[in-house]
Amino acid sequence: MTIHNMPETYTNLIMTGFMGVGKTTVGKLLASQLNWPFVDVDHEIELQHGKAVTQIFKELGEPAFREMEKQFITTLCKDSTQQVISLGGGAFLQEEIRQACLEHGLVIYLDISWESWKIRLPYIQDSRPILQQKSLEEVEQLFTTRRSLYQDHHLCIQMDEIGFEEAAKQIISSLNL
């Protein structure tokens, strides 16, 4: 667990990390324990547009989805309500999203090694449009590229050897919540 440039005040806890690492599960546990609202960005975009993310990717393309994501997240981050927000794995690709999150929240990066993550691939591949039709080598390249983007964070939790409940416990403990 590493803490970087912890802001003195923040209104949101923002979960980031590669797809399938546990952002939504850990985020829900945190929200429940803190009695804060929980927001899953991908789920909210699906509700707003009446389509699954996979359908948005197929019908409108990734650029259209990324624009929806940017609009939703930047607006959400400026909300002063205390909330736990789970970002999609690709959200930090956009500089504007990264900056809004870092400025208006405490960004918690759930880190995982490639070796630990690839065990999860068969369980999530069908529900993640960005993984469709990619070889294992291509997925590893995506993993490596995105992992470097997640280095902008305030708190890092290493997920290789801990469960979701333990991750939530470590977060609450490290933030004195």
Image (cartoon, rainbow, N blue to C red):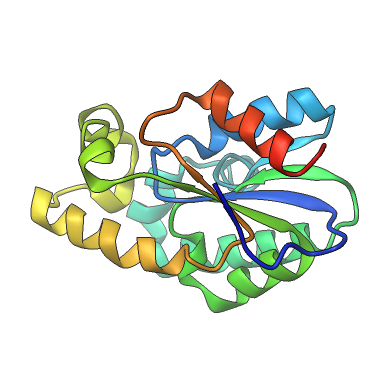
Front-lying residue, 91 or 68: 91
Picture coordinates of residue 173 (x, y %)?
A: 72, 35
Residue found at x 86% / y 63%: 8
Q: Quadrant of residue 96?
A: bottom right
Q: Residue at x 56, y 25 (%)?
A: 166
Vertical placement of residue 160 versus 5, above or below: above
Reply above or below: 81 against 100: above
Q: Is residue 136 left or right of residue 41?
A: left
Total number of numbered labels? 0
Q: Is residue 135 visible?
A: no
Residue 103 appearing in the image: yes
Camera-side residue: 86 or 156? 156
Residue beneath the point at 62% across and 34% down = 170
Q: Is 2 rendered above or below residue 115? A: below
Determine the image quadrant of residue 102.
Answer: bottom right
Q: Is residue 40 left or right of residue 76?
A: left
> Residue 159: image x %, image y %?
43, 37
Residue 94: x percent and y percent?
51, 73
Q: x, y (%) of residue 112? A: 36, 44
What residue is drawn where x is 80% and y is 35%? 37
